[in-house]
Amino acid sequence: MVVGGFGGDWGGERSCLESVRRFREFQKAAFECLDRTDYQTQGGRRYITKSGYLKLATVFEISLESLHTHNERNKETGAIIYSECTVRAKLPSGRFADAHGSCLSNERRFMNPGHHVPATAETRAQVRGISMLLGIGEANQEWME
């Protein structure tokens, strides 16, 4: 199977149907590499975990590159209060997806906000990039809260 090569010449119904068939095979292969520890359940729905997405990135040889990071600090304390990150997820075929992630320090109780706020923003961008590139998954429950 060629990752990222779902399409054909788009020369008619036959090539479109073939592309759909190949994409379904691709999705099946993606989910076969995940096990029960690669999912979390919240609100009765299953979501792929960060480790699950990183496993998918390894299996499909997706490279992750940080394109942009911006941190805002509290003017009085210097503590990071907001971070945003843009990541490029790229397949060996050259196909890529750029994704954005952000995090506020007051979203939860971070033990070390100077590290965890930027790391959370970067992780969100990575997971979104992998998900967008592979055309699988849903937004992590954490982003919906």
Image: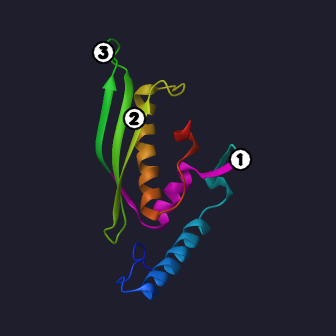
State the SS at label 3: loop
Q: Is residue 46 magenta?
A: yes
Q: Give the CA separation, mark 1 to mark 3.
A: 41 Å
User: Which sits earlier in the primary sequence, circle 1 or circle 2?
Assistant: 1
Closer to the chain start, of discs 1 and 3, is 1
The local crowd at label 1, few if under 14, some if 14 to 19, many if 20 or more residues have their Cα within 10 Å, is: few
Residue drawn at 61 percent across, 51 percent down = 47
Q: CA distance from mark 2 to mark 3?
A: 17 Å
Q: Which residues are magenta?
A: 44-65
The residue at which mark 3 appears reads as: 75
Q: In the rendered image, which quarter is residue 101 located in?
A: top left
- Residues at badges 1 and 3 in contact (C-beta under 8 Å)? no
Q: Which amino acid does the dot numbered 1 rest on?
A: Gly
Query: Which residue of the protein is positioned furthest toward the front in this rendering?
Result: 13
Do the residues under discs 2 and 3 have CB atoms within 8 angstroms?
no
Residue highlighted by disc 1: 44
Residue occupying image coordinates x 35% and y 69%? 92
Q: Nearer the viewer, mark 1 or mark 2?
A: 1
Outermost residue toward the top in this view: 76
Residue type at mark 3 is Lys
* Image location (x, y in percent) of residue 108: 54, 27
Q: Give above or below for 145 relative to 15.
A: above
Q: Residue at x 54, y 67 (%)?
A: 30
- Which SS class for mark 1? loop
Q: Provide the residue designation for mark 2.
A: 118
